[in-house]
Amino acid sequence: MGGGSDSATPPPPAPPQFILYLQGPEYAQTLRQLTLWTHHVLLPVYGREVTSSAPWCSRWWEHPEAVAQLHGLWLAWADLTGPGSGMTGPANWHRDHLPSVMNSLRDPMGPFAGCKPGAHRAKEVPPVDAKDPFGPPPGAPPQA
């Protein structure tokens, strides 16, 4: 009977979930971690000057697109520069991830269009005619 039991070994931690799938306290904690990385690593090193042709919003966390893109950039940063990453990880992050995200965020027509230093401007979500156009009609009994 004897053989060793692995029950004392904790399972490996689950990989982080993309922020758009999180809610409540999980979302708040992940957003806080993202904010700390953005404010203490990303912006001091890669922030560049804010201009009309390269906007930035000082309340970027109120722009869901910016949150999603920055979270993806942060996850890639953790994967490519964290413990156990290869020696070329940082170079790959700079080449494959940083430019496209920063160019997208800082584009004059991007998520910060209309924002100026100290002046956040909320964006309107494009309208749709129906939230679920191929679902059951409103008021229809649920299907079993």
Image: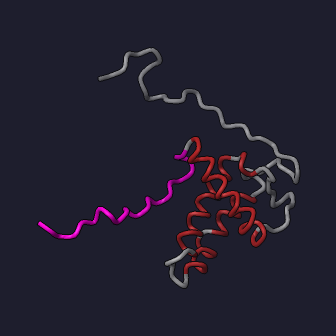
With 106 as the anchor, is 69 left or right in this view? Answer: left
User: In percent of the image, x 53 and y 70: which residue is there?
Assistant: 79
Residue at the limit of the structure toward the bottom, as seen here: 87
Nearest the viewer among 36 and 132 is 36
With 51 as the anchor, is 134 left or right in this view? Answer: left
- Image: 19 above or below 47: above
Residue at the limit of the structure toward the left, as seen here: 1
Quadrant containing the C terminus is top left
Q: Main secondary structure of the magenta part?
A: loop
Residue at the limit of the structure toward the front, as seen here: 2
Give the image location of residue 86, x and y in percent: 51, 82
| Bounds of the magenta segment | 1-22
User: In percent of the image, x 33 and y 22: which residue is there?
Assistant: 143
Quadrant for residue 81, please give it.
Answer: bottom right
With 125 as the anchor, is 141 left or right in this view? Answer: left
The verdict on residue 98 being magenta is: no
Quadrant for residue 44, please give it.
Answer: bottom right
- Image: 91 above or below 67: below
Nearest the viewer among 23 and 143 is 23
User: In percent of the image, x 75 and y 70: which residue is there?
Assistant: 46
Give the image location of residue 17, x and y in percent: 50, 54
Quadrant for residue 35, please give it.
Answer: bottom right
Give the image location of residue 51, x and y in percent: 87, 61
Q: How is the image coloured?
A: secondary structure
